[in-house]
Every structure is written in C-alpha cells, then in structure tokens.
Image (tube, rainbow, N blue to C red):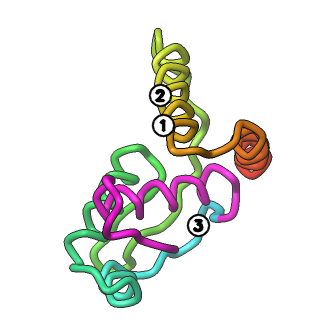
C-alpha cells in the first residue's frame, strides 16, 4: 500500500480506496484478517486515527466487520444494485478524471491501457 501525502485525497481515503480495490478484485477474501489499525498505521507512518477512519468507511460499506479484540475481518458482500443515476454520475466523474489526465499531458493510449488494466484487475 502506498500513501501520497502530497495528493489531494486525504490519507484515510487513499487507504480505503486501495483496500476497496483489493476487496472488489478478490485479492482479499471473506474471513481474511486485516492488519490492526495500529500495525498498519506504523507501517505507513500515519496516525492510527487515519487508518481507523479508512476501516470505519469500509465497514459502513459492508466490506469489513470491526471488533475490538479481533480487529478488521473481511465480510462476504454481494454487489449492491446501483441507485438511480449512479452510472451517469460515475460517467461524469470518469470524464472529469480523464480530462484532467489529458490536460496534464497523459496520452490517450496510456489512459486506454490503464483503464483496460483496471477493469481486468477488478473483474
């Protein structure tokens, strides 16, 4: 896991996003025990509250069960049905992200390759 402290996204969101990707792709299976909040915080050089917030977010999304003595355990989670308009909201966010990348000089071919790889990893 990598955290970019210079990124616009807060560290807790970066942690949650990376863990969510691992959960959705099947890299983390139901029943798996995650590192404790304190262990991951030490590994990443972050405050434990930062990691705790990421874990709480994933628990609220139904990915994790948080218990005091056992820590964070991956739950079985079925894919939810998207709320009305979610696909269009996602398409707008994706277009915005792609426009930012193009404005920064990232070639369209690199974006296509990255998008293909991301879809394959999450499928």
Residue that label 2 marks: 96
Asked if disc 3 and disc 2 are in contact, CB closer than 8 Å, the reply is: no
Q: Please tell me whether residue 25 belongs to the stretch shown in magenta.
A: yes
In the shown orientation, is residue 84 left or right of residue 7? right
Give x and y (percent) for residue 26.
70, 57
Category of crowding for the residue at label 2, using alpha-carbon neighbours closer than 10 angstroms: few (below 14), some (14–19), many (at least 20): few
| Picture quadrant where residue 123 is located | top right
Please give the name of the residue rendered at 37% of the width and 88% of the height, measured from the top-left corner: 39
Q: CA distance from mark 2 to mark 1?
A: 6 Å
Element on which disc 2 rests: helix
The stretch of residues the image draws in magenta is 1-27
Category of crowding for the residue at label 1, using alpha-carbon neighbours closer than 10 angstroms: few (below 14), some (14–19), many (at least 20): few
Please give the name of the residue rendered at 62% of the width and 49% of the height, measured from the top-left corner: 24
Q: CA distance from mark 3 to mark 2?
A: 36 Å
Please give the name of the residue rendered at 54% of the width and 41% of the height, measured from the top-left corner: 101
State the mark number for residue 100: 1
Category of crowding for the residue at label 3, using alpha-carbon neighbours closer than 10 angstroms: few (below 14), some (14–19), many (at least 20): few
Q: Please tell me whether residue 59 belongs to the stretch shown in magenta.
A: no
Give x and y (percent) for residue 34.
49, 75
Front disc: 1 or 3: 1
State the mark number for residue 116: none
Asked if disc 1 and disc 3 are in contact, CB closer than 8 Å, the reply is: no
Residue that label 3 marks: 31
91 and 107: which is toward the camera: 107
116 and 37: which is toward the camera: 116
Front disc: 3 or 2: 2
Q: CA distance from mark 1 to mark 3?
A: 38 Å
Q: Earlier in the sequence, mark 1 or mark 3?
A: 3
């Amino acid at each position: 896991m990598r955290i970019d402290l210079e990124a616009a996204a807060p560290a807790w969101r970066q942690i949650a996003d990376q863990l969510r990707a691992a959960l959705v792709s099947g890299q983390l299976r139901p029943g798996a025990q995650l590192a404790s909040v304190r262990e991951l915080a030490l590994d990443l050089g972050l405050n434990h509250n930062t990691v705790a917030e990421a874990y709480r977010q994933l628990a609220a999304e139904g990915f994790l069960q948080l218990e005091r003595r056992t820590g964070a355990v991956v739950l079985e989670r079925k894919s939810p049905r998207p709320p009305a308009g979610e696909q269009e909201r996602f398409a707008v966010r994706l277009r915005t992200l792609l426009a930012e990348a193009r404005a920064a000089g990232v070639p369209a071919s690199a974006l296509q390759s990255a998008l293909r790889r991301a879809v394959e990893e999450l499928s």
